Image (tube, helix red, strand yellow):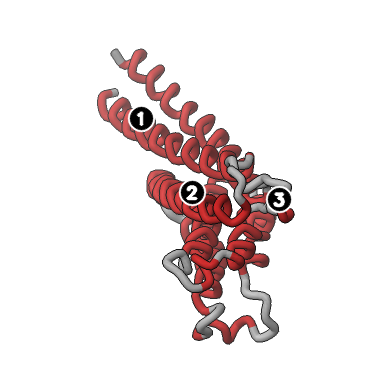
Amino acid sequence: MRLNGSRKSQGARTDPLRLDRIALLALWLTWVGMWGAWIPHHTASLTQNAIYLAEWSDVLLEVRAGPLAGVPNLLRLALALAVVGLAIALGSVRQVWLRWVLRGLSSLPGLVLLPPYPQVLSLWHSDVYGVRFVVAMVLWAGLVASALTDLLPPRVRSSLVGVLSVVAAGLGGWSFLILRRPFEVRYAHSISAGWGVLAFVFGLMVAALLQVAMLRCARWDSASGSQV
């Protein structure tokens, strides 16, 4: 019984490490998907990634003065939460210097999410750019807070990454679907989903599922250890 228990325990310890690496790759796929085409169409140079899709949607009347005014910032929030989830997941990288180099690379979308204005730090109370500034600060604050999450148990980090991944995938996918319809009406063309949005949502959902799998492995490991 002890031999069997030890074998199960060893299997449970190796599986989370493998799953964690795959989850990191899935989150990097999500990061790449931010820069890929979300709405690919040659009409009016409409091929845009997620960041510029949020900008380009200002041409829509429904966004400028209608019920979809908040959708571009929800799309930006999805990107910010995905970056925060990646930053937290990078806490599993053992080399501290490599961990922060990767976090610095992952934060690049945060530079583009900031409002294009010289006095950017005074824009939090702006009627035009205030919400966008707050969304960008979610990304930067999350990046700083990831240093604290490095001190948390792996189970807690996995839970945080899983929740952030699900919320980011939901907001990103929903924003894309909402914005696609008025673009189709405006340009009288059907618009398919680009590889960018597919990579973004798929990567996040895979990462979320792997976090659940790692949590189950950890529970199995604890249960096996208590039985030895």
Q: Is residue 14 above or below residue 51?
A: above
Is residue 189 found left or right of 202 in the rendered image?
A: right
Q: Nearer the viewer, mark 2 or mark 1?
A: 2
Q: Alpha carbon of mark 2 to alpha carbon of mark 3: how far?
A: 18 Å
Disc 2 to disc 1: CB gap under 8 Å: no
**Residue that carries the numbered disc 3 in the rendered image:** 43
Estimate the x, y position of residue 112 in percent, counting from the top left.
Answer: 66, 65
Quarter residue 44 falls in:
bottom right
Answer with mark 1 or mark 3, whichever residue precedes in sequence.
3
User: Residue 82 or 190: which is nearer the viewer?
Assistant: 190
Instruction: Identify the disc placed on residue 221.
Output: 1
Estimate the x, y position of residue 130 in percent, counting from the top left.
Answer: 52, 79
Disc 1 to disc 3: CB gap under 8 Å: no
* Count of number-bearing discs: 3
Answer with mark 2 or mark 1, whichever residue precedes in sequence.
2
Is residue 4 found left or right of 46 in the rendered image?
A: left
Q: Can residue 50 be seen here?
A: yes
The residue drawn where x is 39% and y is 49% is 163
Q: Nearer the viewer, mark 2 or mark 3?
A: 3
Instruction: Identify the disc placed on residue 177.
Output: 2
**Three-letter code for the amino acid on which mark 1 is drawn:** Asp
The residue drawn where x is 31% and y is 16% is 2
User: Residue 59 or 51: which is nearer the viewer?
Assistant: 59
